[in-house]
Amino acid sequence: MSRPRLNWPDPQLREILGAIVARDRDFPLDNARFLDSLVDDVRAVTGRLYGATTYARLLRDLSAVTGVTRRPSTTTIQKAIARAQALAPIHVGQTGDANSAMPDTHMVRRSLEPVMRDAIAPLMAQMSARLATQMERLDTVREDTASPRTEPGLRLQLAEASLADAHARVGRLEQDNARLRRDLGQAEMRASIAETRIAGLLDELHQAITNAGSGSAALAKVADQLQGTERFLKAQNDAVRLQASSEAEALRRQVTQLRERIDHLLLENDQYRRMLATQRDARSQR
């Protein structure tokens, strides 16, 4: 039997397609960061996490459209899901107070990501422009190397030093971005722990109120009802067992009668066969 196809609305599928292409472009050699970003994007679009099979089928079924040929293992996908679950927010039910609802840390994270991208984008554009300028200078140095009137060695060293400095700055920017993501994940983890503790305190308070109030009387009433139901089910079970036994006994008697009837018919058939054989012998003697 074939597996069911992925059933998402077209707008969500378009957003997921764009996210797959963007993440494959951002992390061409890092499967872990690619899967972390993909799981996060799918959760932002659909509002939930899925199993490893769903993400594997997503990459496989949409590869013809996206051009992404990644095939991460199930273990790698499960690790990414576990990391996402560790950072997933825990929602606490409302208790009647409008100020008692805890903030959704995942939504805070999603709202901070565009701000971070907008803050880093000018720096990345500046570094890209510097890299382009250094490459142009390097091309100029390579052209001037053929001329005996210049100092190609010195210019080439300066261009290589500038290029190395630009690469180092880009690396520092990537490290700062990773540090910000780690800090944001730790903040989400602390918020999730706080929400869990508050939920536990609320459950303990509710349990204490139930035990101290009229909860015991309600439980006793429910216990009596369950005992009455148990007795009724036992009586029904006994009646069904007796009926089944009587029906089985009647069937056994019918089977015995049928067997006796069959034996009687076999005897009659044998007698008829002998009678016919005797008649044939008598006719042949005449």
Image: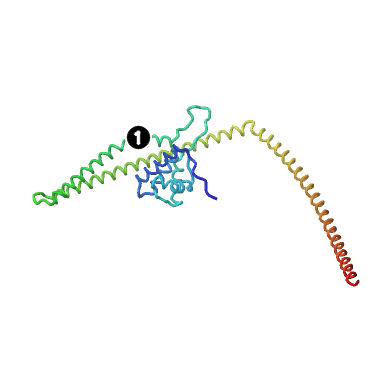
- Specify whether 3 is left or right of 18: right
Q: Residues within 10 Å of mark 1 (few under 14, many from 20)?
A: few
Relative placement, left or right, of 27 versus 247 is left
Query: Taking 160 as reference, is 43 left or right?
Result: right
Q: Residue sitting at 42 percent across and 41 percent down?
A: 16
Say which residue appears at 37% left-offset and 46% top-offset: 24
In the image, residue 266 lies at what x, y percent? Answer: 84, 62
44, 101: nearer the viewer = 44
- Say which residue label 1 marks: 115
Q: Nearer the viewer, residue 177 or 26?
A: 26
Question: SS for tag 1?
Answer: helix
> Where, quadrant-wise, is the C terminus in this rendering?
bottom right
Q: Is residue 185 above or below residue 276?
A: above
Identity of the residue drawn at 68% across and 36% down: 222
Residue that extends furthest to the front in the rendered view of this protein:
286
- In depth, the one of 268 and 241 nearer the eye is 268
Q: Amino acid at mark 1?
A: Val
Residue 114's image quarter? top left
Left or right of 271, for residue 115: left
Give the quarter of the image for residue 269: bottom right
